[in-house]
Structure formats: structure tokens, C-alpha cells
Amino acid sequence: MSGVLLSKEFGVNPSVTQCFYCGEDSGVALFGAGFKKKDERGNLVTAEAPRCVGVLDMVPCTKCEGYMKQGIILISVKDESLATLPEERAAHAREMDKHPEKYRRPFIPNPYRTGGFWVIKEDAIKRMLADGPLKELVLKHRWTFIEDSTAKEVGLIKPEENTNANIESDK
Ligand SMILES: [Zn+2]
């Protein structure tokens, strides 16, 4: 527990974190006195951390770490939702640069997810992607978002598994 400055009021001040990849509870963050909120006068004061803080970083949970050893994680997102990511990443970097004294939060991309989650063998990814920097990045980081239409094209989602159709048939 070294490195955590205990809060007099809240002790280690724990909060559940979630895995960026699978969204499941991945661990506990101990904030101690490090969790701050603004009080009514706008001053930052130590506060009680919420029960769950969500995704704090891009570190995979143990399960996803295992998946990344076996292959590449593919996470489906809505079509066109990846187009704005470079701009969001740049805006985040600008925001961080404005306050260099503050803790640098990592950029966590958050396009609209559509629920598909696959682990694909590295060989399949190598066949799927053209040679180039993107392919190298995906192989290095062991995960990527995939837009629904692409997931259909490569056969991950069968045409009849269209999400809208499923909703219709549930009625
Ligand atoms: Zn995970």
C-alpha cells in the first residue's frame, strides 16, 4: 500500500475499477486522500471515492490479458463512430497541456459500443488487415475496435444477427 496517502476520514478510500476492454470489475483503486472534489467555495478537498470509478486506464484485467496472449481482442462499435477519435485524442492532449501541473489522465477512447467482443487469432488478423502502420499497431496493442459493417464483411456478425432485427423479433 506504499504510495497511498491515507485520508483521515476515508482511510484507503477504495473504489472499484472496470476493465476498458470487457467492462467487468477489474480491481480496486485506493485513492486515500487523493480523491478530490470541489466544495461549495470551489476549493478542491479530499472526498469519499464513489463505489465504482469505472475505467481509469487501458490496463487489461487478468482475463483480457489472457485473451491478448491468445490473440487479438475485437470490440464492435457503431459505424462511423471511429471517425471522430483522432480529433477527440487531440482535444484530450490539448486539455492536458493546458494544466501541466495536474495529473495526466490517459486518453480513453469511448466510441458507441454495440456489444460484439471477439478474440481472433493473430494469423487471422494478419490476413484481415493490409500491411501498414495500422496492422502493426493492432498486433502490438493486441486489441482494436471494429465497426459493425466491417465485422459483417469479415463474417464476425452474420447478416441475420442484425441487432435491429433481434429487437423486432423480441416483441
Ligand atoms: Zn477485461
Image: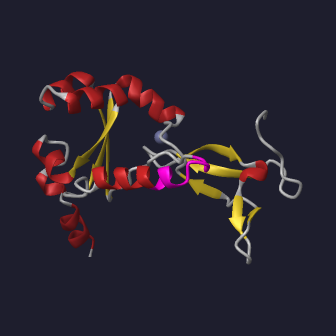
Does 153 appear in magenta?
Answer: no
Q: Which residues are magenta?
A: 95-103
* Vertical arrangement, residue 37 with respect to residue 136, above or below: below
Residue 99 sits in which quadrant? bottom right
> Which residue is at 27% across, 53% downward?
77
Q: Nearer the viewer, residue 70 or 34?
A: 34
* Vertical arrangement, residue 67 with respect to residue 159, above or below: above
Measured as percent of width and height from the top left, residue 157 is found at 19, 48
Measured as percent of width and height from the top left, residue 126 is found at 18, 25
Colouring mode (rainbow / by chain / secondary structure / one colour): secondary structure
> Which residue is at 84% across, 51% downward?
11
> Which residue is at 40% across, 30% downward?
67
Q: Does residue 102 appear left or right of residue 47 in this picture?
A: left
Measured as percent of width and height from the top left, residue 23 is found at 47, 49
Q: Does residue 69 appear left or right of residue 124 in this picture?
A: right
Q: Nearer the viewer, residue 94 or 161?
A: 94
